[in-house]
């Protein structure tokens, strides 16, 4: 459906999430509802100086049910309408938004238009909702142009007055309106009386190449958060999990891990069997600094991939993307340790 005919064409993609939910009074649970009702709840949309077309998942979902198939669906929608639209806004539940938005950042290669993910902590119909500001400003950001060209040419998350690079975000709060943070990269824009875009933080404009969409994501990956007292049996079981191709190990502080013999030996055996291992820190900010402490020397010697300052969300989706691309074992470490969409230092 089109609202106003203006200079820019924006596609609004509704996938589900709190933003479009209503309370089921029988059970007291929040559940997804019809997208048309979302628009009737925000008559302000009709005042924006751009044409807004909307498309909805047939069955909007709580983002806990998102999977790589849904990401491919979002990517296909964008691919199919890429030429006819200047920007895209994806309405998505906040719970797994950082995963989906990171995934899309890898799937959409040579992106030259904005793709803004947003959602809300309170449903759109709630009196105190944060949905209206998030949605309206996301549309304005997606429509921002300079000399007829989009200013932002990457996948972002907009939430509570801040625009972040998608693959740098993490959901850090289940109840504050400020639900997301990007601890290792500054915001790309801030909304106050004026909308300030920090151009110096945006991905540099590359050579103009056509959009390439990669929809194969290999999900044979895992995440293991280390904890004091982890047992040998549990650790080995995870490393030997059937079919597992890559494991992200969330280590302590600057990438540190136990130095017990069984721990190092298990890692060595797993690597010999072809498992890809990635070291990311379980801290929300900061970076893996291999060799800073003695407790990371063994990981360095084993040539475990250094995740540097990547988020777990970006590491999971980068792995799925790279495995889906059949990147060779010989270059896997080098490519993973190189920033391909601004996801790491
Ligand atoms: N459970 C919801 C979801 O992620 C929460 C939200 O939308 O913020 O779909």
Image: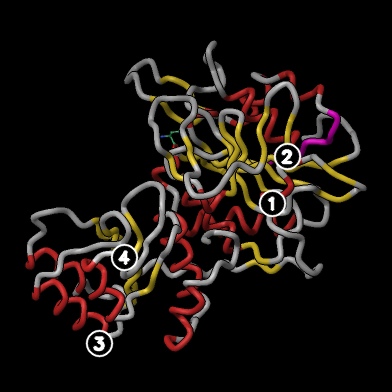
Residue 197's disc is 2
* Residue highlighted by disc 4: 292
Q: Quadrant of ligand 1?
A: top left
Label 2 beta carbon less than 8 Å to ligand 1? no
Residue 93 falls left or right of residue 232: right
Q: Is residue 130 above or below residue 235?
A: above
Image-quadrant location for residue 47:
top right
- Disc 3, disc 1: CB below 8 Å? no
Q: CA distance from mark 4 to mark 1?
A: 31 Å
For the residues labelled 4 and 2, the Cα–Cα distance comes to 36 Å
Residue 272 - label? 3
Return the disc, 2 or 1, that comes first in the chain's sequence.
2
Q: What is the number of the mark on residue 202?
A: 1
- As measured in the structure, the alpha-carbon distance from the residue carrying label 3 to the one carrying label 2 is 47 Å
Q: Secondary structure at mark 1?
A: loop
Q: Label 4: how many residues lie within 10 Å, few (<14), some (14-19) or many (20+)? A: few
Instruction: Tell me which secondary structure the magenta stretch mostly adopts.
Output: strand
Residue 283 is situated, as x and y percent measured from the top left of the image, at 33, 49
Please state which of the two labelled residues, at mark 4 or mark 2, is closer to the viewer: 4
Label 2 to label 1: alpha-carbon separation: 9 Å
* Contact between labelled residues 1 and 2, with CB atoms less than 8 Å apart: yes
Q: Is residue 51 magenta?
A: yes
- Sooner in the amino-acid sequence: mark 3 or mark 4: 3
Secondary structure under tag 2 reads strand
Query: Percent x, y for residue 130?
Result: 56, 22
Distance between the alpha carbons at the discs numbered 3 and 1: 40 Å
Q: Earlier in the sequence, mark 3 or mark 2?
A: 2
């Amino acid at each position: 459906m089109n609202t106003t005919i203006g200079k820019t064409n924006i596609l609004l993609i509704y996938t589900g999430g709190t933003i479009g939910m209503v309370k089921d009074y029988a059970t007291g649970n929040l559940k997804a509802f019809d997208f048309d009702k979302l628009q009737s709840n925000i008559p302000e949309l009709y005042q924006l100086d751009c044409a807004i077309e909307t498309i909805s998942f047939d069955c909007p979902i709580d983002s806990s049910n998102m999977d790589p198939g849904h990401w491919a669906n979002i990517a296909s929608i964008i691919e199919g309408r890429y030429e006819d639209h200047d920007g895209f806004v994806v309405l998505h539940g906040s719970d797994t938004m950082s995963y989906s938005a990171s995934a899309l950042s890898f799937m959409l290669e040579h992106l030259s238009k904005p793709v803004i993910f947003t959602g809300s902590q309170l449903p759109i119909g709630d009196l105190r909702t944060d949905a209206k500001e998030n949605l309206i400003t996301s549309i304005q950001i997606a429509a921002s142009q300079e000399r007829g060209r989009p200013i932002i040419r990457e996948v972002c998350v907009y939430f509570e007055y801040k625009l972040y690079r998608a693959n740098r975000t993490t959901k850090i709060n289940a109840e504050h309106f400020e639900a997301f943070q990007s601890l290792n990269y500054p915001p790309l824009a801030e909304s106050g009386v004026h909308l300030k875009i920090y151009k110096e933080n945006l991905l540099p404009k590359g050579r103009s190449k056509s959009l390439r969409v990669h929809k194969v994501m290999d999900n044979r990956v895992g995440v293991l958060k280390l904890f004091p007292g982890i047992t040998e049996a549990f650790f080995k079981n995870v490393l030997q999990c059937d079919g597992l191709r890559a494991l992200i190990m969330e280590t302590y502080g600057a990438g540190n891990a136990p130095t017990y013999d069984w721990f190092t030996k298990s890692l060595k055996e797993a690597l010999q069997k072809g498992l890809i291992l990635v070291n990311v820190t379980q801290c929300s900010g900061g970076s893996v600094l291999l060799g800073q402490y003695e407790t990371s020397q063994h990981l360095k010697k084993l040539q475990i991939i250094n995740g540097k300052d990547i988020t777990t969300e970006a590491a999971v989706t980068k792995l799925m993307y790279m495995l889906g691309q059949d990147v060779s074992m010989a270059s896997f470490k080098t490519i993973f340790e190189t920033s391909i969409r601004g996801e790491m230092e």
